[in-house]
Image (cartoon, rainbow, N blue to C red):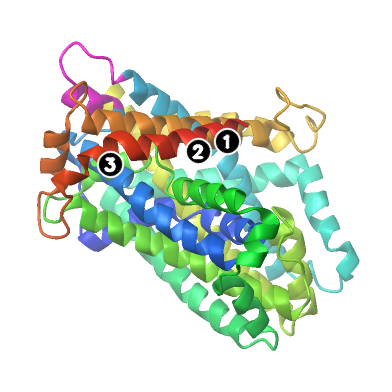
């Protein structure tokens, strides 16, 4: 069977960026920035994205493009004879599936809030009762299941038409809508009367604010966020390397993907912090910032129903772009590894993900008393496994595979990465990849476990 390809470079960039752009950008980045002193955190975030995130992104893409296969077959095609690197490929498949087991639920929350604003459910709700809307949503297994199932069904429906006709075509429309919504929401927030105070907190580095949190904590949080925003380590990006052409170098494409990902994260902050400052809302509210704190802002805002609907439509686009991208990875594994048709792979994965997502849905109501190994509810435990274990360990394995003689090797990786026009990866970076990047990843792993 002939390998599918992207129809255009723009399609590859938008789908790859869409995979990276997700809940980590539009939900986690603003509240982590708020908790870690604002401007200085943003500077460290950008630094670590450049020195750590981008190089590992090129490695995932290189494995995909060189092999033209999904992750298990990719390792088997590139690994030295007799080695077992491909075992990590199966771990990557499990990681992508586990990610979707809770990501679809959170994506469903975004969709549910868009619907609630669109139909006017927040109209007339007193400010001190707005948090009850989220509590009622979590307590209702039927409502959560419906929105999760819509997300899963829509994601696999998009992917069922193939890479070009399904994933690429829909992602182009969705990402265009995402960027337009960002611009509208940013302009609106910047025109609010308290915007200047919010921008100062967000964009002006303050040593005193960072010192209150602890500089070490700020740096570690920035390192974690820059690393996790790209979802590296579970081959979520590797599959798109297998569909791309060799016209452009991988470092150049990685820079573009990271720039688009960072743009959305930074713009999310420009939407949220001026609004919080205007309406005197704490920016360090943590995970509640999006679903409880911001709705209070919209409740006090002229035209709040419209702005709330647009904001959660933007959030839904951002999360759904990741869902479709990871679904494509799971579908490709079925096609490449098990020889299934796309239709069969879509059907099998749809049933598996739909069923496997139910424990997370029920973890907020029927199973709300369950605390797994001291890590909290089902969502918290699944997120811990993926974010704190699979992503850093997987990224370390990709790094070792691409830079050591025991794996694919630095020369082969470098040749693949530098094929085409654009920014090249320097050979002299090998010592940095051997000694510095592993230390940074181990720091992330250890702090995550602690």
Q: Position of residue 413 (x, y in %)?
A: 17, 37
- Left or right of residue 91: residue 68: left
Quadrant that contains the C terminus: top right
Q: Residues within 10 Å of mark 3 (few under 14, many from 20)?
A: few
Residue 448, numbered label: 1
In the picture shown, does residue 109 fall above or below 358? below
Marks 1/2 in contact by CB < 8 Å: the verdict is: yes
Task: Tell which circle, 3 or 1, labels the residue nearer the N-terminal end.
Answer: 3
- Left or right of residue 174: residue 275: right
- Check disc 2 and report the residue beneath it: 444
Q: Nearer the viewer, residue 79 or 209?
A: 209
The segment highlighted magenta reads 72-86
Residue 2 can be seen in this image: no
Q: Residues within 10 Å of mark 2 (few under 14, many from 20)?
A: many
Quarter of the rendering containing residue 1: top left
- Check disc 3 and report the residue beneath it: 432
Q: Secondary structure at mark 3?
A: helix
Residue 189 can be seen in this image: yes
Q: Position of residue 432 (x, y in %)?
A: 28, 41
């Amino acid at each position: 069977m002939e390998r599918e390809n992207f129809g255009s470079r723009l399609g590859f960039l938008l789908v790859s960026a869409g995979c990276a752009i997700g809940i980590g950008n539009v939900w986690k980045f603003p509240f982590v920035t708020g908790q870690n002193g604002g401007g200085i955190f943003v500077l460290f975030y950008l630094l670590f994205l450049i020195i750590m995130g981008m190089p590992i992104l090129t490695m995932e893409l290189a494995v995909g493009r060189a092999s033209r296969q999904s992750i298990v077959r990719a390792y088997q095609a590139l690994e030295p004879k007799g080695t077992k690197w491909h075992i990590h490929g199966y771990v990557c498949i499990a990681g992508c599936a586990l990610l979707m087991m809770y990501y679809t639920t959170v994506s469903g929350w975004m969709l549910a809030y868009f619907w609630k604003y669109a139909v006017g459910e927040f109209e007339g709700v007193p400010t001190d009762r707005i948090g009850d809307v989220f509590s009622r949503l979590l307590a209702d297994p039927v409502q959560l299941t419906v929105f999760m199932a819509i997300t899963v069904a829509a994601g696999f429906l998009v992917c069922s038409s193939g890479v070009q006709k399904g994933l690429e075509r829909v992602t182009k429309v969705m990402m265009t809508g995402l960027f337009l919504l960002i611009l509208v929401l940013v302009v609106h927030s910047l025109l609010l009367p308290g915007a200047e105070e919010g921008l100062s907190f967000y964009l002006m580095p303050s040593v005193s604010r960072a010192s209150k949190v602890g500089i070490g904590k700020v740096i570690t949080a920035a390192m974690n966020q820059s690393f996790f925003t790209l979802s590296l380590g579970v081959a979520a990006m590797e599959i798109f390397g297998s569909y791309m052409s060799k016209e452009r170098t991988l470092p150049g494409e990685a820079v573009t993907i990271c720039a688009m990902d960072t743009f959305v994260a930074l713009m999310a902050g420009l939407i949220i912090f001026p609004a919080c400052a205007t309406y005197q809302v704490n920016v360090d509210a943590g995970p509640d910032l999006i679903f409880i704190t911001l709705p209070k802002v919209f409740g006090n805002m002229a035209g709040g129903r419209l702005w709330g609907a647009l904001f959660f439509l933007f959030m839904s686009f951002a999360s759904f772009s990741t869902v479709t991208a990871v679904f494509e990875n799971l579908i490709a594994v079925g096609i490449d590894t098990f020889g299934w048709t796309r239709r069969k792979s879509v059907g099998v994965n749809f049933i598996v993900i739909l069923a496997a997502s139910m424990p997370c849905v029920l973890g907020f109501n029927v199973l709300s008393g369950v605390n797994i190994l001291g890590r909290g509810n089902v969502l918290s435990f699944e997120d811990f496994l993926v974010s704190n274990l699979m992503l850093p360990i997987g990224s370390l394995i990709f790094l070792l595979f691409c830079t050591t003689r025991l794996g694919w090797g630095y020369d082969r990786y470098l040749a693949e990465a530098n094929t085409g026009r654009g920014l090249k990866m320097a050979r002299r970076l090998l010592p940095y990849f051997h000694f510095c990047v592993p230390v940074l990843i181990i720091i992330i792993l250890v702090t995550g476990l602690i």
